[in-house]
Amino acid sequence: MSASTMQDENKIRTLWLVGCGNMGSALLARWVDAAETIVVVDPGSPRLPEGVEHLPALPAGTLPRPDVVVLAVKPQVAPAALAGLPAVVGPQTTVVSIMAGTMLSDLAAFAGEAAVVRAMPNTPAAIGKGVTALYANGLAERARVSVERLFERAGPVVWLESESQFDAVTAVSGSGPAYVFRFIEALAAAGEAAGLPPELAEKLARATVVGASALAEVDPRSARDLRAAVTSPGGTTQAGLEALDADPGLPSLVRAAVRAAASRSRELAEGR
């Protein structure tokens, strides 16, 4: 079989996105040419790229069946929002859920005969800088390649060895962008408190985090080594880092944040 034939077999012809909130719309921004037909199912009035079809709810049935259906609704509304899903999908459909805390075993109730994949992307996916963790049981190679290529449009993809890793993934990369944005807020506020005008403090804080992140992306050194390269013994950076590490310290606070987010992910899985 030629490479072009294999590529055509893995091509997604019909892609449905159920839910188009912050994460759904971030992914959609990278998927506008990922399939011949793209359908968004959302009860609201989302702003959609040209050519994307919109349905307010899942229909009673559809032919042909979609190749891939991505579930991007909140777990709390899933039972009502996805009640019609079994009538839409078929045995050749792959259902991908990005719902936090929703186990594969729970998804089976919505997916009917379809294969099921769990995914945890993050919002930088909107600009192709996201990272997505994937997990599935016994997924056919063709479906695996199609799903992987779909999410690679939004950034790097990793496959997890165990579904139990999702709580930690959710807490680190899923929630992680919010931690970074919170740090930008705090750095800007600290700059303002030190005497900078608010707009300048915000601009410096944003540009500093963006620049440091861009360097970390291309420099092969570890984060520890990159941090050390900026820190002159007895200098201003060392003084600032010592304050960040003072009890309870930044590492302890970040561990607490990840622990709390992972705990909440487990609670969602338990229906709490």
Image (spheres, helix red, strand yellow):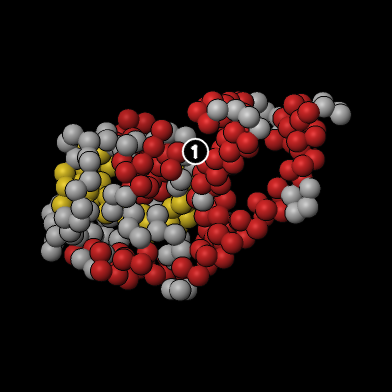
- Please provide percent x and percent y for residue 260: 59, 62
Quadrant where the image shows the N terminus? top left
The answer to which image quadrant residue 13 occupies is top left
Q: Residue at x 27, y 35 (%)?
A: 32
Q: Give the side of residue 75 with respect to residue 228, left or right.
A: left
Taking the image as shown, residue 120 lies to the left or right of residue 232, namely left
Q: Residue furthest right?
A: 234
Give the image location of residue 65, x and y in percent. Answer: 19, 54
Amino acid on which the number 1 mark rests in the picture: Pro
Q: Closest to the observer: 265 or 63?
A: 265
Residue for point 47% across, 55% down? 135
Relative to 16, say whether 155 is above or below: above
Q: Is residue 86 visible?
A: no
**Which of the pair 147/265 is nearer the observer?**
265
| 53 left or right, relative to 152 | left
Other-residue count near label 1 (Cα within 10 Å), few / some / many at <14 / 14–19 / ≥20: some
Residue at x 52% of width, y 65% of height? 264
Instruction: Report helix, strand or loop for mark 1.
Output: loop
**Residue located beneath label 1 in the image:** 156
